[in-house]
Amino acid sequence: METAGARDIRYGEEFKYMNDSARAPAALPRKRSEHWQVTLLIGLSQLIVTTDFSIVGVALPSIGRELAVAADLLSWVVAATSLALAGFLIPSGRAADMFGQRRCIELGAALFAGASLLCSLAPGIGWLIAARAILGFGAAILAPASLSLIHTLLPEGPVRNRALGLLGTMQGFSLAIGLLIGGAVTSAFGWRAIFLVNLPPILLIVVLARRVIPAVTVRTAKQALDVPGAVLVGLGPSSVLASISMLNRRGWDYAPGLMLLAAATATVALFFFVERRVKAPLLPPRLFTFRNVLGGNLATLLLMGAIAGMFVLMSLLVQQRYGLTALSGGLAMMPYAAAVAIGGRVVSMGMTWATLKTNALVGIVLQIVAFALLSGAVPSVNYVAGVMPGMICGGIGNAIAFVALMAVATETVPRQEQGVASGALLAAQQLGVAIGVAIVLMGLSSGGFTGGFLTAGVFGLSAMLVVAMATTAIHRPGGTPGHMSRPGKGVRQCDGDIG
């Protein structure tokens, strides 16, 4: 058993642990029922974060009418949460590594629940926006801590594959379910009730966390706080999202928006510059020396741009072409959600048969085929024959690619850095959604729905090229950890545990 200075050898490269005193939990879940509880905890945590945006989006008109708010100010109900979430994902991921996932999940859930109650009681728009910012902060703490449990509590093989597949299914379902829940609850009980929908799953998350997560899952040695890194990574991604939102509303020739985008880009670049020079970096630069971490995050950013663009275009298409309401449009999107569920099941089995890289490429190819089908379906007036085939193909492909790339980006990361790696991956997803929707809507404005789908297809094609050229194959046979080394290099199999 290795002691101080333990090294994890992956793909023939040496990765020295950041803290020699990091330790594994005293007891990991061993029973099948405990594995399912961990999986449910992870899925619910991601579900409430992703459904929030679509639920609130449906209720915005009602909020605007009751509070007498103009559209520009009303958009901050969503933007406040997005900016807080994007800005705190990476610092929160590092906090989960340092202080334990259970503490962070409990804190994030408490903030999320408290902010939801404040939102439901909001007397005015200022109160509501402030509460939504607190909710985003809570989501930023909850999401990376729960996501990191996949690699810290679940054994490699079928158990972990099932969790990843379920996560992909819930991510896909969240958007369509959010539209349905948001429309139904707002119509029946008013917009304030939509914020109370979060409370039962949050309570279940806390109960599950206390049951199945050890008090300290992974803790690193005490270290100096990277204050400059935390400030820069908080400002960078949130400023990127703010500038893109501004440019979407005012036009891409709006000078203040372009200046903010340039400043945001410079802030992100400065963050990576600083991280290479501080003693205890918030986001260790060496993580990105691994091809799969760097390539997986970049491909995920591009993939999420394609997925978000596809969903927005399909939602607009079914509502505008067939004159459906938001609630009816949500029902029309259910074939996509069902296809995502099928894709989640397929990828959970596919990861035991083929490499993660192969799974990702298959999913992206299906996604590109879906864009071709949907762009050709635009002239059609038949929903079943025109739109539904592309929806189903895209849903299956999106789930396969999403789950496989999530595994690619985190599979090789040591146990005690899973939190910050998960935070970085979630930040890439957030940026991908914002950038993808902005550019796809530009394609929609200039070339109609056909132009929009083709623009989204470019994101998918770019993701496929990144996966093909910038990642290596990881084979995960059922029940047995396995990693493929580069030619000419030895490899020692290791699942990331610390002896």
Image (cartoon, rainbow, N blue to C red):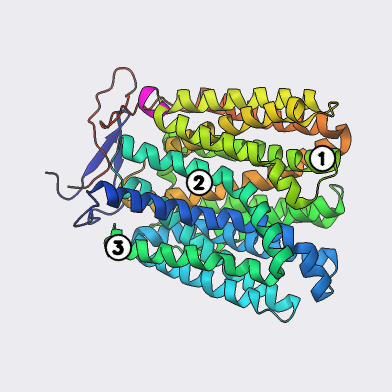
Q: Is residue 408 above or below residue 89?
A: above
Q: Earlier in the sequence, mark 1 or mark 2?
A: 2
User: Residue 26's x, y, as percent?
Assistant: 19, 57
Residue 425's disc number: 2
Q: Which residues are drawn in magenta? A: 350-354
Q: Is residue 285 above or below residue 237?
A: above
User: Residue 112's x, y, as percent?
Assistant: 53, 68
**Residue 399 figure quarter:** top right
The prevailing secondary structure element of the residues shown in magenta is: helix
Amino acid under label 3?
A: Arg
Residue 442's disc number: 1
Residue 211's disc number: 3
Q: Is residue 486 above or below residue 179?
A: above
Q: In the drawing, does residue 250 fall left or right of residue 402? A: right
How busy is the neighbourhood of tag 2: few (under 14 within 10 Å), some, or many (20 plus)? many
Q: Residue furthest top?
A: 487
Residue drawn at (34%, 22%) of the image? 486
Q: Nearer the viewer, residue 443 or 413?
A: 443
Secondary structure under the numbered disc 2 in the rendered image: helix
User: Residue 489's x, y, as percent?
Assistant: 28, 22
**Callout 1 touching callout 3 (CB < 8 Å):** no
> Does the magenta portion include 368?
no
**Callout 3 touching callout 2 (CB < 8 Å):** no
Q: Nearer the viewer, residue 227 or 119?
A: 119
Q: Is residue 282 visible?
A: no
Q: Earlier in the sequence, mark 3 or mark 2?
A: 3
Amino acid under label 1?
A: Met
